[in-house]
Each structure stands twice: as C-alpha cells, then as structure tokens.
Image (cartoon, helix red, strand yellow):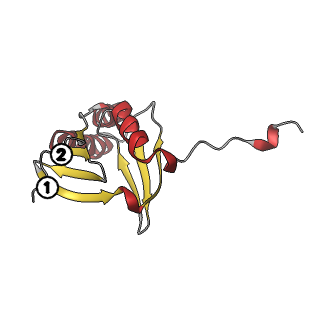
C-alpha cells in the first residue's frame, strides 16, 4: 500500500531507539546467574531480539491527520487523530510505552522510537488529549 500523498510536507518519520530491546536482552541475560537458567534467559532475550528486529523494520509516521505505522515501506495501520480520546507516555525515563485510546479501542505500544521526538509530535498534533499525572489532592491543606 502506498500513501495517497507520499510527498506530504507535514509528515514526520520518527528515528528508531534501541533502548527497550537492549534493556530486555540484558534483563534476560541477568537470569543466567539464577538457578533457573537457561530457559528464562532464552525466552526473555528472544523477546528482546524480536523487539530489536521490530525497531529496525517499523517506522512511525506522523501526518497532519494520522499516526501511520509502516513496516519495510508498507503501511500497516493508520490511526486518525480525529478518533483519539486520550494519550500518555508511560515510564518515559525508562524504556516505556505509549498508551492511546481511540473511540473503538485502547492501544499500548512499546516505545521503539526516540521518546522526545514522539512526545514532541504528539504534543504538536494532539496536545489537548494528553492524560496528565494526577495530583494527590488529599495531601493539600485547606
């Protein structure tokens, strides 16, 4: 599938980040020092290598109206911003997740992209839908 307007001047493709896959691979390798090795190491590190492969093949493209997931140049899925209800980046300092909810369903994606660029693009396109951290009002003095 190709985009209707491949030369969309407002579109941005995010650079890949390998933090999450490498973090998971090393977490799996830590299980080598436990009495349960090698199976947890094999399972967890295999998942990390799968995510590493995905970080090389998947791209997120932000257009004026949509978030587009592209794999090896082919469009996999399009998420129109007009259908979004809310979004939030969970654990942004660690290898985290992007949560966003559309009218039809919620989505939770591992962040395989540069987190600052992701937040910047989301803020430009759907800033008003960001879920802010809740402030504990029970501790405030009246």
Query: In this rendering, would 136 be left or right of 116?
Result: right
Instruction: For the residues labelled 1 and 2, say whether their Cβ atoms are less than 8 Å apart.
Output: yes
Q: Residue at x 26, y 46 (%)?
A: 47
Please state the horizontal and vertical placement of residue 89, each as a whole percent of the image: 45, 42
In the rendered view of the protein, which quadrant contains the N terminus?
bottom left
Residue placed farthest to the bottom in the image?
104
Residue identifier under label 1: 3
Residue placed farthest to the front in the image?
9
Q: Residue at x 51, y 47 (%)?
A: 128
Q: From what the image shows, is residue 25 above or below residue 51? A: above
76 or 128, nearer to the observer: 128
Residue identifier under label 2: 8
Please state the horizontal and vertical placement of residue 119, each as a whole percent of the image: 40, 37
Q: From what the image shows, is residue 1 above or below residue 104? A: above
Q: Residue at x 57, y 43 (%)?
A: 132
- Looking at the image, is mark 1 or mark 2 nearer the viewer? 2
135 or 120, nearer to the observer: 120
114 or 11, nearer to the observer: 11
SS at circle 1: loop
Residue placed farthest to the right in the image?
142
Please state the horizontal and vertical placement of residue 129, each as a whole percent of the image: 50, 50
33 or 69, nearer to the observer: 69
Q: Quadrant of residue 142?
A: top right
Give the distance between the C-alpha atoms of the residues marked 1 and 2, in whole angstroms. Answer: 9 Å
Q: Residue at x 22, y 40 (%)?
A: 55
């Amino acid at each position: 599938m190709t985009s209707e307007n491949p030369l969309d001047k407002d579109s941005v493709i995010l650079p890949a980040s390998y933090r999450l896959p490498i973090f998971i691979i090393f977490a799996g390798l830590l299980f080598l020092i436990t009495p349960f090795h090698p199976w947890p190491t094999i399972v967890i590190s295999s998942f990390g290598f799968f995510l590493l492969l995905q970080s090389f093949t998947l791209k997120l493209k932000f257009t004026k109206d949509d978030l587009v997931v592209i794999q090896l140049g082919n469009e996999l899925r399009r998420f129109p911003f007009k259908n979004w209800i809310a979004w939030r980046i969970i654990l942004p300092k660690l290898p985290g997740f992007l949560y966003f909810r559309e009218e039809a369903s919620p989505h939770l994606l591992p962040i395989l992209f540069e987190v600052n660029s992701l937040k910047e693009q989301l803020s430009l396109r759907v800033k008003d839908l960001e879920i802010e951290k809740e402030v504990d009002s029970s501790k405030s003095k009246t």
